[in-house]
Image (cartoon, helix red, strand yellow):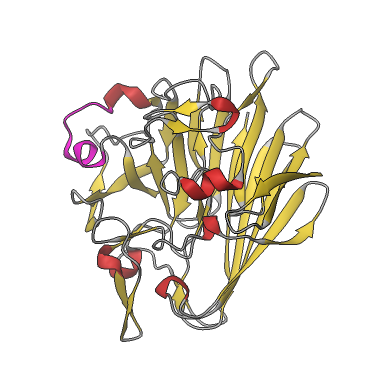
Amino acid sequence: MTKIRFGHTKSGQDAFLYVFSNKNGMVMAVSDFGATLQSLWVPDKNGDLRDVVLGYDDPASYEGNSLPFFGATIGRNANRIRNGEFILNGKTYKITKNDRDHSLHSGRDFYSFRMWEVQEETEHSITFSLYSPDGDQGFPGAVDIRVRYTLTEENEVKIEYRALPLADTVLNLTNHSYFNLNGHQSGNILDHSVWIDADTYLSTNAEAIPTGEIVSVAHTPMDFRVKKQIGRDIGQGYEALLFGNGYDHNWCLNNKGAFAKVAEVSSAKSGITMEVFTDLPGMQMYTGNFITKENGKANAVYEKRQGVCFETQYYPDAVNHPHFPSPVFRKGEVYHTVTVYKFV
């Protein structure tokens, strides 16, 4: 592991990159600013390295461009909460509204804009920690949070989340990396082929809030049970795609809470395939539908659909839907979940 100065935040704090490599030449760079995955270099079919995640060259650029959430650790609750409020133990809690009348990724005081402490370093991994006090972002209960990134010799980026709440609260952490297997600067991802192990997805309204209905993917553009290119159906006049301006939906995974392979994405151009493993019940695939002329790292300019996210998670707005898997964790109950992005 090599530690590199990344730059200063707007408040003058020093941020660093922690760079890891493995025997296959793969390189992962993560930052203590936002516990962010900043770069990921992967060998292509010719053995050349391609940086396959979108990002920025310094902390100030991340601070100045909040909406893409490139590579960010998202918490305390990933995705949306309807009307920015929920009831827990008979009490109503209000979260900052930052997406029309709703809360997206827990309001405006994002975990991705905070300095995380380095808790532990090894040759292959780094653990970041964050203390989230009672009332942080409007959520009840103080929580100690740990996020560990590991680069394995099997070309896996393993992200492990742990948290211990001191009171009943909502916990739903994810990573918001945008992947482009042709390289972060190489244009859109419509030629990428995707498989998702899910028979159903969540119906939402026009504001991306779940209606509560769990819908079969059969005979719809949402069916990725047979691998297909992202661009094949994305332009269809299907209501969900019209609402999302493309894919931006939660698939209800078939893993039944067990750690398993749940998705795969590949590019014929680069010859790179990425497998997604998780023990979480849902995954939001987002195809970067609202990226426009975003000045990224290495002088890249990112445009619409230049990256695809695979955000493993509890379902969006799950705290307001009793029939969804619950993101509520009780006082002293350990939150522990693992997601792996494996390159083959």
Residue at 63% over, 36% down: 39
| Quarter of the image that includes the N terminus | top right
Instruction: Name the side, left or right, on which 343 lies relative to 190.
Output: right
Visible in this render: residue 145?
A: yes
The answer to whether 236 is drawn above or below residue 93 in the figure is above
Q: Quadrant of residue 230?
A: top left
Whether residue 183 is situated above or below residue 313 in the rendered picture: above
Provide the residue span drawn in magenta: 234-244
* Label total for image: 0
Q: In the rendered view, does 292 fall on the left or right side of 237?
A: right
Whether residue 71 is visible here, answered yes or no, is: no
Q: Return the residue nearer the eye: 116 or 141.
A: 116
- Image coordinates of residue 100 in percent, x first then y, are 24, 56
Residue 27's x, y, as percent? Answer: 72, 34
Q: Is residue 138 above or below residue 211?
A: below
Q: Position of residue 276 (x, y in %)?
A: 53, 41
Q: Is residue 239 magenta?
A: yes
Given residues 272 and 98, the one toward you in this image is 98
Image quarter (top left, top right, bottom left or bottom right) of the C terminus: top right
Give the residue furthest to the bottom.
90
Between 145 and 2, the one nearer to me in the picture: 2
Residue 333 in percent (x, y) is at: 55, 77
Answer left or right for 314 relative to 221. Answer: right
Residue drawn where x is 64% and y is 16% of the image: 45
Image: 312 above or below 117: above
- Magenta stretch holds residue 101: no
Q: Residue at x 23, y 36 (%)?
A: 241
